[in-house]
Amino acid sequence: MSSDRKPGRDPERMATSRLLALIFPAVPLSAMGLPLAIFVPPFYAALFQQSGMGAAMAMSMVGTVFMIVRFFDLFTDPLMGVLGDRYPSRWGRRRHWCVLATPVVMLGVVAVFLVPFPDLVSPGYLIASMVVFYVGSTMYTITLFAWGAEMSRDYHERSRITGGIQLALFVGNLTVLLPPAYIELVLGEPPGGRVALIAFGCYILALLPIATFLAVKFVPERPTAAAPKIGFWPGTRLILKNRYMRRLLIADLLIGIPAPVMTSVFIFFLRDVIGAGLWTSVILIANTAVTVIGVPFWVWVSRHLGKHRTFCLSAILACLNVGLFLTLQHGEVFKFAVVVTVAGFIFGAHSMLIRSMAADTVDEDNLESGGQRTGLYYSLITMTQKIGGAVGIGVAYPLLGFFGFDPTATEQTEQAINAIRYTYTFLPALALIGAAAVMWNFPLDIIRQQRLRAELEARDRERGILD
């Protein structure tokens, strides 16, 4: 790999070769997320029905399980953030956690996606396997984003690194959809069936160890101030005092609701409202391909408008896009594909910008606490996103069951179809409006961040951390 410091080059700019190695693990990590949101819930709802549950009970059970497991992350996410900050190894603060997380993730993938004994699946099995899965993915995801955030102190370079990770996430979403697209269109298997889930699982199991090895081998960590040795409650008070982080967490909670709601209901909307179930993976591939293109665009826009203004713009455009789904009628497959594809382009901005702003927010805490607590802060960002997702699925599925939706029925009632349509649009639209309102006057812009950076660099030079 090439050096990060070349004559005439910005020392804060990370070499492209190292950036590619750093973001590679995000590809298999994202390959878990999209199938988990779209294909896994219907699969387990169908399994529960086959075991004798009624349709409404099966839908509610899946929604409840996902919500319970997500709220379990209220404890595991901050714990992982603290452990990552406080317990380095000879490799640094982050890399060894990626290595430790890899086998845990792989065990969870086998349990959730490969489902070795489908006849024995129960709500207890789903809870246990999802806990293992989420513990591993939490360890890895928080570590990866914290690692990336600590690779630069520059306002725009952080967007480049975070955008790169987000781009890799979308590439993973895109490539993992190719096998199920073949399964649906060529083999005629239904979307969300066991064959598709096995294909997802094998993809992740093959790629994750390779990506981990390359990142750990070729991306040395940047020296940072050690995590401050302060107690839990004093440390918590510092976080709550951080006005930037308070607003960022609320925005992340809200922006985390639309995607889980829409993805968890996506198969039903396409199959029962539009009437084109076998096009699920193809439309998702188009959506994700455009999202990949959108990330560099939003990074470019943020360089001109600033991160928070760009976030608000994308949230407002996403809200308008969500409203278009209410205009679609049965048989309008092409229009649906166009609206979904545009949504992918717009939604690509949200998570990337939130995480880039989180890296800036850590600077404030670094000055106040006296040390780097990137892992803890990113664990909070991860946690709020998961809570938003838990609320989304936990509300959407029971709501559909309440209005008579049956995931195994060949025809739905008019009431059930309307429930799908309005669940798919109203909750996401309200969350997007709220997120834009929270971030509209976000005070941590490039000027404030550069002042924080200058203070931090002066302090770290005195400590001997920087040359």
Image (cartoon, rainbow, N blue to C red):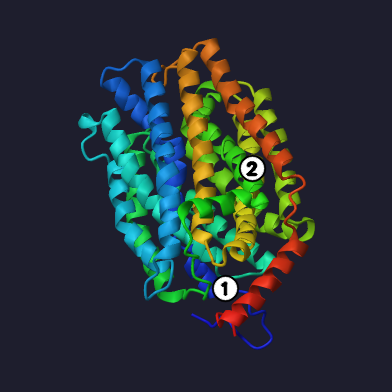
Q: How many marks?
A: 2
- Residue 185 in view here: no
Mark 1 neighbour class, 10 Å CA radius: few under 14, some 14 to 19, many 20 or more: some
**Disc 1: which residue:** 16
**Residue 352 image position (x, y, % from top left):** 61, 53
Height in image: 451 above or below 83?
below
- Based on the displayed image, in which of its 4 quarters is residue 324 positioned? top right
Residue positioned 51% across, 25% down in the render: 396
| In the image, farthest residue toward the bottom | 7
Q: Amino acid at mark 1?
A: Thr
In this rendered view, identify the residue nearer to me: 324 or 130.
130
**Residue 144 image position (x, y, % from top left):** 47, 60
Compute the Cα span from label 1 to label 2: 31 Å
Residue positioned 79% across, 59% down in the render: 304
**Residue 375 image position (x, y, % from top left):** 49, 59
Height in image: 405 above or below 338?
above
- Residue 359 in view here: yes
Q: Is residue 368 left or right of residue 93?
A: right
Q: Secondary structure at mark 1?
A: helix
**Disc 2: which residue:** 251
**Residue 191 image position (x, y, % from top left):** 41, 33
